[in-house]
Amino acid sequence: MTRTRPVVGMLGALVLAGCGPLVAYDQPGVSVSRLANDLQSCAAQALARAPVDITRERVTVQVREYRYGIPRTGYDRVWADIDRNEVVREEIRQQCLQAKGYTLTQVPRCSNAGVVTTETRQAAAGPGSCGVNVSGVGPVIVSGS
């Protein structure tokens, strides 16, 4: 009996996610370095207000089994580490970024963005803009295609 773990499905989803649009924090005119600082300070503020609280719980996961070449869906119980404050921490981080003037928006991925430096300023999200991933920052909105 061969079992495919849920991790394989997640890896496939991550590969496919690399082709789709990006979700970025939109604030036209802000520099990449300021965006990075704001993201870091809001994450630190959220962590201070809602620290990591890990509990170990048994959860049910769906697994795909193959017997004699016939796929069958089954269920398994596994131990998982659950962070009780993860959702609250993300809400605090989002509120902090909104207070600093950022909004979440979806932009197409850039096919040719050029060079993005720490002094590059974000473009306004719109028909002529696209997103590019910047290491250590995340998606940044730039003009281009």
Image: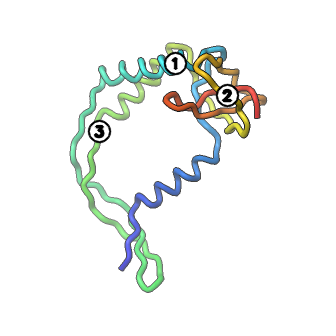
For label 3, the residue is 83
For label 1, the residue is 98
Q: Nearer the viewer, mark 2 or mark 1?
A: 2
Please name whichever residue, 59 or 79, is drawn nearer the observer in this view of the structure. Answer: 79
Q: CA distance from mark 3 to mark 1?
A: 24 Å
Q: CA distance from mark 2 to mark 3?
A: 38 Å
- Sequence-wise first label, 2 or 1: 1
- Disc 3 + disc 1, Cβ < 8 Å: no
Residue at 71% over, 30% down: 114
Amino acid tagged 2:
Val
For the C terminus, the image quarter is top right
Looking at the picture, does residue 101 appear above or below residue 93?
A: above
Q: How is the image coloured?
A: rainbow
For label 2, the residue is 115
Q: Nearer the viewer, mark 2 or mark 3?
A: 2
For the N terminus, the image quarter is bottom left
- Sequence-wise first label, 2 or 3: 3
- Disc 2 + disc 1, Cβ < 8 Å: no
Amino acid tagged 1:
Gln
Amino acid tagged 3:
Asp
SS for callout 1: helix
Residue at 64% over, 19% down: 120
Residue farthest along the bottom direction in this orientation? 68
Q: Position of residue 28 (x, y in %)?
A: 66, 17
Q: Is residue 67 left or right of residue 104?
A: left
* Mark 1 closeness class: few <14, some 14–19, many ≥20 residues within 10 Å: few
* Mark 2 closeness class: few <14, some 14–19, many ≥20 residues within 10 Å: few
Q: Position of residue 78 (x, y in %)?
A: 27, 59
Residue at 57% over, 31% down: 134
Please name whichever residue, 117 or 18, is drawn nearer the observer in this view of the structure. Answer: 117
SS for callout 2: loop
